[in-house]
Image (cartoon, rainbow, N blue to C red):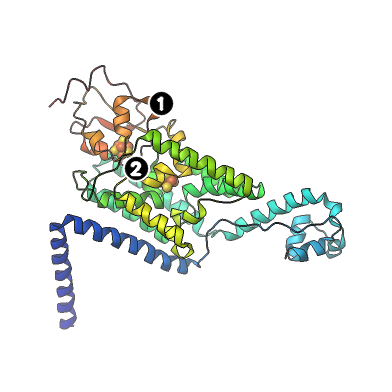
Amino acid sequence: MDIAVSLCRAIVEKMLSGAAQMGKYPKVKTVASFFVVVLLVTGLSIISVHIWGGKPEEAIHIEELKIDDEMTLSEFGQANDLPNNVLKELFDLKSPSDLGKRLDEYGTAEQITVMATRKLALTSEAASKNWVKIPLKFGLWFIFLPGVFLYCRKRKVTSVTRKGFLCASVLIFGIIMGADPSPMGTVKDAIHLYGTAQAIFPPRMIALMIFLALVFLANKYICAWGCQVGTLQDMIFRINQTDKHKTIIGKKIVLPFTFTNTVRIVFLVLFTIVALSWGSDIVEPIDPFKVYNPMYLGLGGMIFIGLLLVASLFMYRPWCHLFCPFGLVGWLVEKVSRVRVSVDYDTCIACGKCAEACPSTVMSAILKQDKKVIPDCFACYTCRDVCPTGSIRFSTRQRTVPPMDHFKKGKKE
Ligand code: SF4
Ligand code: SF4
């Protein structure tokens, strides 16, 4: 027993002295933390996927149906590997003898193809979902997000609490609860399913409405603290930041919003055209949500996600700003959100610390009141917590225009 206690003490002391040593070398600590995060996320996710039963959680593929007007229902089933119970549901059959009826009694080949493809797609969708995990995950979102919201409204979000919330979100909504469902999936998979089978999966529409309602009620809170890929990128970005919001390795990359948003719009348009024209999903091979399902990633996907995570060290949420379909839709809904970040110019001393600390270009756009192109605000509270006069609020307060020359008079003390 004594030996075990001594051994534990020696290990803990070794770890503490290692951490202290690391503190002296912040760049080494940043690189080491990055690899630890990536290895822990992928490693623990593999274990989690096995525990849940290891479903691929990827888009369904409906093969082109083999069909001929002169076939009987039974022959149609054999040609397409459809068991009798599926045929019964597809054609609403009353008795087994109905399997001998000809297909043309149920419509033209084209009508039957559309109807069967749609029904098969919806059945496959429903079968591919984990119906225990999905409501459980939404339940956890409904507990976690209001908790973070209330905490952030009342208290200062220090670098430690921010990392704690991000870490908890990655662990709960990513590693433990997996890649699906996700805010992005509700937009991307809905378009893809419509493209492949002209079908709309009602549970996905409900999920999308819930996510958009969250954005309407509380800004991009779901993206800020609940999305498993958004929080992972945010966490990695913060690894490379000091407590004073300075970059430790390299320089912070801030791309103009007009550029990032144009890329995001073009990407969504391209995705939609390809999905509707050819039924393909161009996001699938590089889907960053598969970081929580790494065994279903190909080499291209691994390289892309690896680069994306490295880019997150220097750029704030590259996937959200450049590619995410929900990022774009959420940004539009954010314009009518009840809660928004705003500045009280009566107490603002024009020091510009908020814009400097904002990981994106949002705060500088707000200060300039460039109303039409205010970028996505991820409700990270960095601006509010660096403001020396407490002039920044997340509330239903309307944004006002800064008084003329407010920022031209120079920095006030
Ligand atoms: S924008 Fe970012 S945080 Fe929001 S759904 Fe997309 S990946 Fe997640
Ligand atoms: S720093 Fe402020 S304005 Fe910038 S993203 Fe965070 S909450 Fe939004």
The residue depicted at 28 percent of the width and 21 percent of the height is 402
Of 317 and 96, nearer the camera is 317
Q: Earlier in the sequence, mark 2 or mark 1?
A: 2
Spatial distance from mark 2 to mark 1, Cα to Cα?
27 Å
What residue is disc 2 on? 149
Crowd rating for badge 1 (residues with CA inside 10 Å; few <14, some 14–19, many 20+)? few
- Per the image, label 1 sits on a secondary structure element best described as helix
Q: Is residue 24 left or right of residue 340?
A: left
What residue is disc 1 on? 372
Crowd rating for badge 2 (residues with CA inside 10 Å; few <14, some 14–19, many 20+)? some
- Per the image, label 2 sits on a secondary structure element best described as helix
The residue depicted at 40 percent of the width and 26 percent of the height is 372
Quadrant of the frame with the N terminus: bottom left
Q: Position of residue 26 (x, y in %)?
A: 17, 55
| The disc label shown at residue 407, or none | none
Type of the residue with mark 1: Lys
Q: Quadrant of residue 100?
A: bottom right
Q: Position of residue 294 (x, y in %)?
A: 44, 63
Q: Is residue 173 visible?
A: no
Q: Is residue 315 above or below residue 126?
A: above
Extreme residue in the top direction: 404
Q: Position of residue 403 (x, y in %)?
A: 26, 18
- Whether ligand 2 has any atom under 8 Å from the Cβ at mark 2 is answered as no
Q: Is residue 405 visible?
A: yes
Q: Quadrant of residue 382?
A: top left
